[in-house]
Image (cartoon, rainbow, N blue to C red):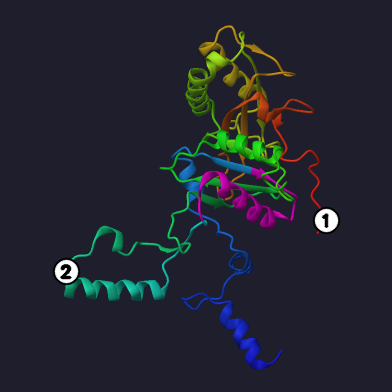
Amino acid sequence: MGEEEIKSVERSEQDEGGSVLSPWEQHASVINLPRYDYRTPSLLAETSRSGFLITCPIKREKSATKEAISILEKFCHLGDSEVLEPETDAARKRKRIEGNEIEHHGEVSEENKAPNLHVHQSPSNQKSTLSLVKLARSGLILLTCAADTQIPTVDVLSSIFRSLECKDLKAPLWCHRIFPFQETCILKEKELCGVVTNLCNDYLTTQGNKIEKPIKFAVGYNRRGLEQSKEPTVLDRNQCFSVVAKVIKDLAPDAVVDLNTPQMAVLVEALPVSGLPSGSAIAGVSILPSGLITAKPRLSVKALISDANPKKS
């Protein structure tokens, strides 16, 4: 490679502010992946979010992320994911120019005012509703919705399965399972009880007349990355089951546990979000109908394809 070619490559690996991009950012720019949203972990402790936790092969997270976004775009009407990053020198210069224009030409409308963050968006300028969150474990992808956005995540997964069954959607290569959580909460008894109560109330209100009585339910709890936790504030498996079962029994006294053929399943998934304080944990919670779950070998959301082993690259 000649000297001019080397300089050309070096220039292409710099952003508009002149700093060299990290390997992840270089890779993301090539295959059109969003960068991690580092603001979300702290916000998850304050506000509940919906979203999707996706399992994939280790070291295939980038391929699975691209595949997952492509699938979800079809059913969530997301458009291209936006990327938020610290404001660059070029963006600050543009704001100064726009500020001078305001002085000469008067006020501009709210939509034309420069934001505090530099936003890269698709040509359609459509705002993304999902953020890619960095996790502390491999083989997982976490996409969360904006706090002011409501996506019917369970309905989205149902639509994905229907499209797979009728061959309208190509079977994924890298995404094994998509867990559609409806809310998040701190993994403590009081917070979990509140979220499960809200979700169960909604589910029984909308689906109660369609469910055969007595209601058969099951509870699944996946402590991803928390198996060895000794923190007293983090719920163990028995505590989680007890909290969820009590909520359901209070709302539907005749409900019975059925681990083999449940009509509804309350799934609690610990989200191993990177950057959380020691001793704290965030869980994604969802209530799924029987058509989206498998009971054996353990209670879980259904795999997207019958053979979860992806093709070798």
Find residue 213 and report its image quarter. Answer: top right
Residue located beneath label 2 in the image = 106
Q: Earlier in the sequence, mark 1 or mark 2?
A: 2
* Magenta span: 54-79
* Residue situated furthest bottom in the rendering: 3
Q: Is residue 61 magenta?
A: yes
Decide: is 93 above or below 168.
below
Seen at 59% across and 60% down, the residue is 33
Residue located beneath label 1 in the image = 312
* Label 2 Cα crowd, 10 Å radius (few <14 / some 14-19 / many 20+): few
Q: Is residue 60 left or right of residue 200?
A: right
Prevailing SS of the magenta stretch = helix
**Element on which disc 2 rests:** loop
For badge 2, the amino acid type reads: Gly
Q: Position of residue 38 (x, y in %)?
A: 51, 55
For badge 1, the amino acid type reads: Lys
Seen at 66% across and 93% down, the residue is 3
* Residue situated furthest top in the rendering: 254
Query: Which corner quadrant holds the C terminus?
Result: bottom right
